[in-house]
Amino acid sequence: MESSRPTFPNYPEKYRGTALIRPEVIVARLLDNPERPIPECVILGYSPRLRPLLRARGFSLMTGYSAPWHSMWLQEGPEIAAVGVVEGFGFGAPGAAIVIEELAALGVQRFITLGFAGALPNDVGFGDVVLCTGAIRDEGVSHHYVTPARFAYPSESLTGHVRAALANSGSPFVEGFTWTVDAIYRETIEEAQLYRDEGVITVEMEAAALFTIGAVRNVDVAGLFTVSDHLLASPQWRVAPDKGVLTEGLRRILDVALRVLSPHGHFESRAVNAEVEEPENPFE
């Protein structure tokens, strides 16, 4: 076999091809099942720290949805069809891509991807809030959807609503680009330093893929993070020593996301001071 310069995608006609498996087929049984509510907007989460925060805000878990997400957090009452939270499907772009594809096929129109991210610059602290304005496409999923390019971008309108909600909350935040890479043990020092010097603020594993799929499927996607670790502030990778700071950061971005996606732009937390479990895994 002759060697040739590597290209991506490997099949040149990839973007003109017909998909073998369509999300509409996978979720068909849910489309006509009123016992499984489908909200208008969904928050995608990755940390189990979200669960006690959701319970404290009047959400309960409803099962019976598609794999890999299986369940959805929903509120009781008249706003049950407004906002849902899907989490527990793992980390990384491939899993998140399956979830957003299926939810978009069910009719969800607005998404906020919400979770922890590593910081590249030293002046961003643990628990700080970051509004994502673009993502470096260093994962694999997005390249199966659109031709190669360096960046993917969130929904301009939804990001604007998140920005306004952050400003109105009175809590400080920063905004900027993220580096999306789905090979966590191959994030190199040299890459991290390059992106930091270019002004990139965070690193995480899903945003570029979700922004790309959002554009392809014509749904709005925004990204909101809180800083859980530092890649370059010390000779070694550093995780936040105070896990309470992480929970507080997650609480702040969850409440902002809920206010943005809830009807009429408001959300009342029912039990802000509820006790929160403390997982041992620093990524949780």
Image (spheres, rainbow, N blue to C red):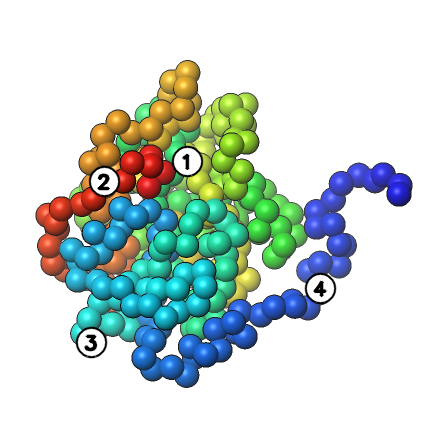
Look at the numbered discs 1 and 3 and tell me whether their residues touch, using CB distance below 8 Å.
Answer: no
- Residue placed under numbered mark 3 in the picture: 78
What is the spatial separation of the Cα atoms under label 2 and label 3, in whole angstroms? 32 Å
Residue 32 spot, x, y in % from top left: 41, 83
Q: Residues within 10 Å of mark 3 (few under 14, many from 20)?
A: few
In the image, which is nearer the foreground, mark 2 or mark 3? 2
Q: Is residue 182 left or right of residue 120?
A: right
Q: Quadrant of the N terminus?
A: top right
What is the spatial separation of the Cα atoms under label 1 and label 3, in whole angstroms? 37 Å
Which SS class for mark 1?
A: strand
Which quarter of the figure has residue 34?
bottom left
In the image, which is nearer the foreground, mark 4 or mark 2? 2
Looking at the image, is mark 4 or mark 2 earlier in the sequence?
A: 4
Looking at the image, is mark 1 or mark 4 earlier in the sequence?
A: 4
- Residue placed under numbered mark 1 in the picture: 202
At 27% from the left edge and 50% from the top edge, which residue is drawn?
50
Q: Residues within 10 Å of mark 2 (few under 14, many from 20)?
A: some
What is the spatial separation of the Cα atoms under label 4 and label 2, in whole angstroms? 47 Å
Relative to 24, say whether 209 is above or below. above
In the image, which is nearer the foreground, mark 2 or mark 1? 2
What is the spatial separation of the Cα atoms under label 3 and label 4, in whole angstroms? 43 Å
Residue 169 spot, x, y in % from top left: 19, 48
In the image, which is nearer the foreground, mark 1 or mark 3? 3
Residue 11 spot, x, y in % from top left: 75, 54
Three-letter amino acid code at the position of disc 3? Pro
- Residue placed under numbered mark 2 in the picture: 278
